[in-house]
Amino acid sequence: MFSVCKSQSGRRPQRGDLIEIFRGSYQHWAVYVGDGSVVHLVFILHVFAGFNSIAVITQRGVVREENLRAVVGNDQWQINNSLDSTHNPRPADVIVKEARSWVGREITYHSIRRNCEHFATEQRYGVSASQQVDTHLMSVLSVMHAINHYFS
């Protein structure tokens, strides 16, 4: 049996739970798959020197299964299934099977449209969503509205 660390609230994660890890200015997300492991989308940046020194940057991510303690490190984390109130979570076996089917695959990563939170919520609910992106976009829209109102 693997020793599973407890979240800030003292709860131990269950298979299929979403794990939110606080990394300063952003949160990293993973899916708990049991035995102390999580599956998560990790950002990788490829920079290629092109013809005549033109750089081509591609944003990619790779899906990994790793030990929860190793992924969390010294950061704070919590179990966050907050979308359960608006979306029906799939059965734990389906979540874990689907998440593990992605392990080792390299996929497109986009901080607004396809990030680690989108990946994690898609595994749990079958729907891709990111509350942190929605929150940041609403903040930007509020500022734009205030500026527009000021200059109107």
Image (cartoon, helix red, strand yellow):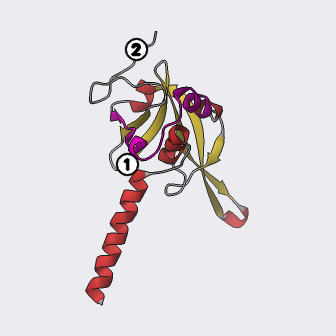
Q: Does the magenta run of residues contain 84?
A: yes
How far across and down, in percent of the image, does residue 89 sit? 49, 37
Q: Mark 2: which amino acid?
A: Ser
How far across and down, in percent of the image, does residue 135 sit? 36, 58
The C terminus lies in quadrant: bottom left
- In the rendered image, the residue lying farthest to the top is 1
Depth order, front residue of 47/66: 66
Bounds of the magenta segment: 75-98
Is residue 28 placed above or below 16 in the rendered structure? below
Q: Mark 1: which amino acid?
A: Tyr
Residue count near mark 2 (Cα–Cα under 10 Å), binned few <14, some 14–19, many ≥20: few
Q: Which residue is mark 2?
A: 3
Depth order, front residue of 9/88: 88
Q: Residue at x 51, y 49 (%)?
A: 115
How far apart are labels 1 and 2 at the CA level?
Answer: 27 Å
**Residue 13 located left or right of residue 8:** right
How far across and down, in percent of the image, does residue 75 sit? 33, 34
Q: Residue at x 58, y 30 (%)?
A: 94
- Residue 26's tag is 1
Dividing the picture into quadrants, the one containing residue 9 is top left
Q: Residue at x 40, y 14 (%)?
A: 3
Q: Does the magenta run of residues contain 151?
A: no
